[in-house]
Amino acid sequence: MGGAADLALALDPVAWARAALAFEPDAWQAQVLRSASRRILLNCARQTGKSTVTALMALHMAIYRPGSLVLLLSPTLRQSSELFKRVADFYRHPAEAVPSQAESALRLELASGSRIISLPGKEGTVRGYSGVDLLVVDEAARVADELYYSVRPMLAVSNGRLVALSTPFGARGWWYEAWHSPAAWERYEIPATQCPRIRPEFLEEERRALGEWWYRQEYMCEFLDAETAAFRREDVLRLWSDEVETWQL
Ligand SMILES: Nc1ncnc2c1ncn2[C@@H]1O[C@H](COP(=O)(O)OP(=O)(O)OP(=O)(O)O)[C@@H](O)[C@H]1O
Ligand SMILES: [Mg+2]
């Protein structure tokens, strides 16, 4: 690609996503991609495309800022692999997404020296990184407070960016507090009703199946108190019992 054309793609991640990946971002995704903010919160309903947009941010930075370090943090190995696979698929190197060891961090290293490293949310695997240019915290509501506080200093020296994304999970924890704090986060709230790929009929069906409390949390971005839930949190957690021990709630 020519110098001027490449410069345009370097400066505009939306143009890059369209030209290089044939990906058309939703309007809010385009806004996130073009944001210059160093602190971003994405409070989005399930399946609205929040992981996808951060995978694009990560890859754009790695490609156009040589030597950059991007960390993708998720609460579980499965979630961390999923987000990483999305990055690798966009990069069209699916083979790199296959973990060599089940517990190890997944990484994509570009010729420019940039690295994208995906970490499951265990403090042991997370320590040891510094000079992080972009830190993405996926499923943020399920990332433990201690882990969040232990990763933030990695941005200090590099003055790096932090993007945290999640569907709400109760009115508690750092993610809830960040969303409601006076701190200067750039905030995006995307309910399922705003997503062009989620049909109103599906949402009606979900509202009936889940009940009002869960519907409002999963699809309408609401932070709801656990006491008002029709189910006990413990019972719900047990449904995902294979993940429970790594959620670090
Ligand atoms: N702009 C877009 N155009 C077309 N498809 C999209 C777009 N953004 C996201 N998608 C698709 O929508 C689906 C959900 O995206 P994604 O996994 O990023 O959502 P999510 O908000 O992270 O969901 P979850 O809450 O389940 O983690 C995926 O199949 C993804 O490829
Ligand atoms: Mg996701």
Image (cartoon, helix red, strand yellow):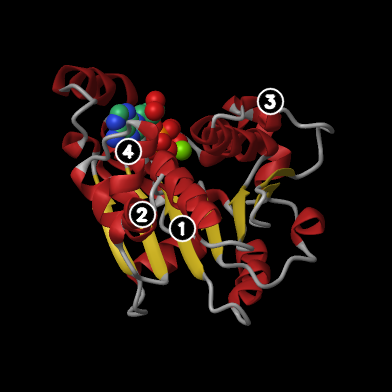
What kind of residue is marked 3?
Ala
- Ligand 1 within 8 Å of disc 4? The answer is no
The image quarter in which residue 211 lies: top left
Reading the image, the residue beneath label 1 is 164
Going from the N terminus, do you reach mark 1 or mark 2 first? Answer: 2
Q: Comparing marks 1 and 4, which lies closer to the viewer?
A: 4
Q: Comparing marks 1 and 3, which lies closer to the viewer?
A: 3
What kind of residue is marked 2?
Leu
Q: Are marks 3 and 2 in contact (CB under 8 Å)?
A: no
Tell me the crowding category of disc 1: few under 14, some 14 to 19, or many 20 or more residues within 10 angstroms, Cα based.
many
Q: Comparing marks 2 and 4, which lies closer to the viewer?
A: 4
Reading the image, the residue beneath label 2 is 42
- Ligand 1 within 8 Å of disc 2? The answer is no
Q: Are marks 1 and 2 in contact (CB under 8 Å)?
A: yes
Q: Is residue 140 visible?
A: no
Looking at the rendered structure, the secondary structure element under dot 1 is strand
Reading the image, the residue beneath label 3 is 95
In the drawing, what numbered circle is on residue 19?
4
Q: From mark 1 to mark 2, how far is it between C-alphas?
A: 6 Å
Q: Are marks 2 and 4 in contact (CB under 8 Å)?
A: no
Q: Is residue 116 left or right of residue 62?
A: right
Q: From mark 1 to mark 3, how far is it between C-alphas?
A: 27 Å
